[in-house]
């Protein structure tokens, strides 16, 4: 009975030990994925900020500029591209809408971002664009990979349509989470004018004909949860200028927009709460279940070997064991009784001692 139990425990121990790497290296890449139908809205603010007045072409300070970023998963496009790409793909249609203190539009830039559902690597397909311009991304955008590493990454900048390193600057604590802090600085670069201008009748083509160009620089900062790869906070020190041409007196330059852009506090709290709930699911597949199965397998293996050793140990009264002690001495065996198969010898005659001659 002990031998059967030890074999069963040994089989379960082998199963648990084999299941541990399967959960981490096979199940995790196939189960931890961005859902194709995700929808998210983020509100950021720059308070105060500087904006250009297109009526006078002079910069003025305003109390607040609001940036609303909307992210919507395109399920139909994800399925279509996934069939040709041979892997799970997510398509995000995003919009960055900048509004002035009066709520009127300052600029809006749509994007289509196509990427691998697990690794977040860009997937190049028809429709990948920024503000209607076809692009071919390299590196990440919006989100880091699951299990983010302490290293630099390549991050795509939508304004310049190019990618540049974003540098790991250390580990910090943010709202009770241990996060990785990243920074990226884009130097002054000439960038396209938005397709949609804030003043009726002014188009990017008409501005460019007057010789005026748009320039941009930013310092980008992210606090990233290393388990899910989701930023729990983001900020930018953002500057834009219009330079040269007939729009500007003397061919000089004017600040089009400048400000320290930060996530609004209520959206920070909501993002942290969401990330805390999602990181538990990732940890189940990468840490809790694999290490738990490995530990359970080791315990069951030790128990199996213990039962096997007890089953092989000689017991009392067996060969090689201690013989029980009694006070009767050796057993002479059963009394055979008289031999009834042959003649009975006569008794011997008594011998006498003769005293005579």
Image (spheres, helix red, strand yellow):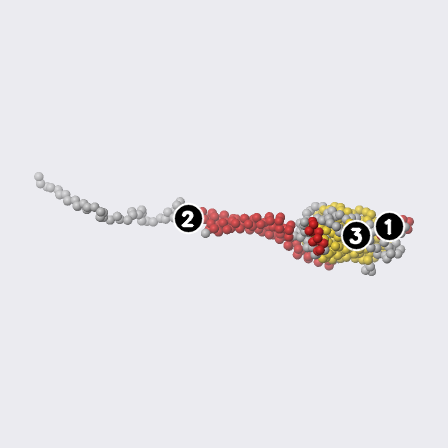
Q: What is the number of the mark on residue 208?
A: 1
At 50% from the left and 48% from the top, the residue drawn is 305
* Relative side of 58 to 313, left or right: right
Image location of residue 48, percent across then percent down = 81, 56
Mark 2: secondary structure: loop
Looking at this view, is 261 or 56 the one in front? 56
Q: Are marks 2 and 3 in contact (CB under 8 Å)?
A: no
* Farthest top residue in view: 357
* Relative side of 119 to 319, left or right: right
* Relative side of 187 to 24, left or right: right
User: Looking at the image, is mark 1 or mark 2 nearer the viewer?
Assistant: 1
Q: Residues within 10 Å of mark 1 (few under 14, many from 20)?
A: some
Image location of residue 27, percent across then percent down = 62, 51
Looking at this view, is 341 or 239 the one in front? 341
| Looking at the image, residue 76 lies above or below residue 350 | below
- Residue 289 in view, yes or no: yes
Q: What is the number of the mark on residue 315?
A: 2
Image location of residue 77, percent across then percent down = 72, 54
Cα–Cα gap, marks 2 and 3: 85 Å
Could you tell me which quadrant the C terminus lies in?
Answer: top left
Q: Residues within 10 Å of mark 2 (few under 14, many from 20)?
A: few
Q: What is the number of the mark on residue 132?
A: 3
* Relative side of 346 to 263, left or right: left
């Amino acid at each position: 009975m002990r031998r059967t139990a030890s074999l069963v425990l040994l089989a379960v121990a082998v199963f648990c030990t084999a299941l541990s790497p399967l959960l981490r290296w096979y199940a995790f890449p196939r189960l931890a994925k961005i859902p194709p139908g995700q929808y998210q809205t983020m509100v950021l603010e720059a308070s105060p900020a500087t904006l250009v007045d297109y009526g006078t072409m002079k910069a003025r300070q305003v109390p607040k500029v609001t940036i609303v970023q909307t992210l919507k998963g395109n399920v139909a496009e994800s399925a279509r591209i996934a069939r040709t790409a041979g892997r799970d793909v997510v398509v995000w249609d995003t919009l960055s809408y900048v509004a002035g203190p009066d709520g009127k539009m300052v600029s809006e830039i749509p994007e289509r971002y196509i990427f691998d559902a697990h690794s977040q690597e860009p997937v190049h397909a028809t429709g990948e664009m920024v503000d209607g311009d076809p692009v071919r991304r390299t590196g990440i955008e919006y989100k880091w990979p699951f299990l983010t590493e302490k290293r630099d990454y390549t991050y795509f900048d939508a304004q310049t349509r190019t990618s540049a390193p974003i540098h790991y600057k250390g580990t910090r604590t943010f709202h009770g989470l241990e996060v990785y802090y990243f920074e990226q600085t884009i130097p002054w670069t000439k960038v396209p004018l938005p397709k949609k201008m804030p003043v009726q009748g002014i188009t990017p083509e008409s501005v460019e004909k007057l010789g005026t160009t748009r320039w941009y620089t930013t310092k980008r900062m992210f606090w990233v949860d290393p388990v899910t790869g989701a930023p729990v906070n983001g900020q930018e020190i953002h500057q834009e200028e219009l330079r040269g041409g007939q729009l500007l007196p003397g061919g000089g330059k004017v600040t089009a927009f400048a400000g320290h852009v930060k996530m609004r506090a209520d959206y920070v709290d909501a993002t942290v709460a969401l990330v805390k709930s999602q990181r538990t699911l990732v940890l189940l597949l990468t840490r809790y279940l694999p290490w738990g199965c490995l530990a359970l397998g080791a315990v069951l293996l030790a128990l199996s070997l213990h039962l096997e050793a007890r089953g092989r140990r000689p017991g009392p009264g067996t060969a090689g064991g201690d013989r029980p002690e009694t006070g009767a001495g050796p057993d002479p065996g059963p009394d055979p009784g008289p031999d009834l198969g042959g003649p009975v010898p006569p008794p011997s005659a008594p011998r006498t001692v003769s005293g005579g001659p």
